[in-house]
Image: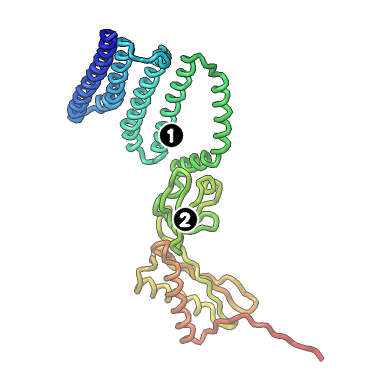
Amino acid sequence: MEIGLSAFDMNYVFAALTILLGIVIAFLVRTLVRWLESKAEETDTKWDDIIIAAFGLPVQITIVVVSIYFAVTWFNILPENAQWLLNPAFVTAFYIIISAWIISSFLHDILTTYGRVLAGKSETDLDDRLIDLLELVVKYVVWFAAVMAILKVFNIDITPFLAGAGIAGIAVALAAQDFISNFFGGAIITVDKPFKVGDRIKVDNYYGDVLSVGTRSTRIKTLDYQVVTIPNNKITTNVITNYSEPDEKLRITIPVSVAYGTDIDTVKKILLDIAQNVIRNTDYLLDDPAPKVFFLEFADSSLKFVLYVWARKYNLPDEIKDSINSLIAERFAEEGIEIPFPQMEVRMKK
């Protein structure tokens, strides 16, 4: 009885030594991997880095797990109620998981390393977004295939899972239709380039400077310094006014009204003089295109003119209107030109 017990104890010792040997080998492999990584950094190509990263850790884990498997099977240390762990299906499932891990890491690193380099050479960020999408798809596809293979190994009918995956895919697509439309809206903005970051635009009732164009939305900082987030699909279906293109100058319209009886030529001359004064004494206006004045209308109680001037930049309309209107009020007062206001005459009959 004592001899049998001693032999049983020795099985545990040999099993422990086998596992310890596996751990030592895994540690040596880890040291080798680190050395290979340092050498790979010295090479121009990235393929060696990708291969080492993909195989390094999975191989180390495989060595430890295989040593445990051999320790258990060679020295028969598992109790009767745990013998089901020796089912070859579990071994196959483990190798499927390790293979999926290696393939997923390998493909992901290729996309990250070489895909990013190629995407960085283009002027648009559409390909960057496609790389993000491909990285996500690669992981899910590889691991979904691995799960299906494992179920097949255990003789589980995968047809319901595939049907369920199809239904789930349709449900996800319907739930994510806004995200998808916004994603492709961002792609359309990137390709069509109706504006870029830093441009001043007007979309719907929102007017401001573009802060960012993201995968889902575009952010605009309004003149009130509020950040407005607009879904990309709303932008692609709206009229966009870009004040920064084709250049930054902007025509400013100054309406002017004077009383009936005022000399038209005098008004035109004063308005052009005022415009030239602002051009000379401020940095607001351009002298080319030149300012222009037009007599537009005989209104109910006034003669209506319009002064067109060209701002150097789109963000100066208020400063320009303030400068010109202040000078108009001053000059009209000096010249005795009346600026009419709406009046109503009421006559009552007895």
Q: Which residue is mark 1?
A: 133
Residue 259: quadrant of the picture? bottom right
Amino acid marked by disc 1: Leu
Mark 2, secondary structure of its residue: strand
Residue 40 % position (x, y): 20, 27
**Residue 243, can we see it?**
no
Residue nearer the viewer, 282 or 124: 124
Farthest residue in the bottom direction? 350
In the image, residue 349 above or below residue 321: below
The answer to whether residue 4 is seen in the rendering is: yes
Please tell me whether mark 2 or mark 1 is closer to you in this view: 1
Q: Between residue 80 and residue 66, name the one nearer to us.
A: 80
Near-viewer residue (234 or 35) = 35
x, y percent for residue 204: 55, 55
Q: Earlier in the sequence, mark 2 or mark 1?
A: 1
Which residue appears at 42% of the width and 63% of the height?
315
Q: Is residue 260 left or right of residue 35?
A: right
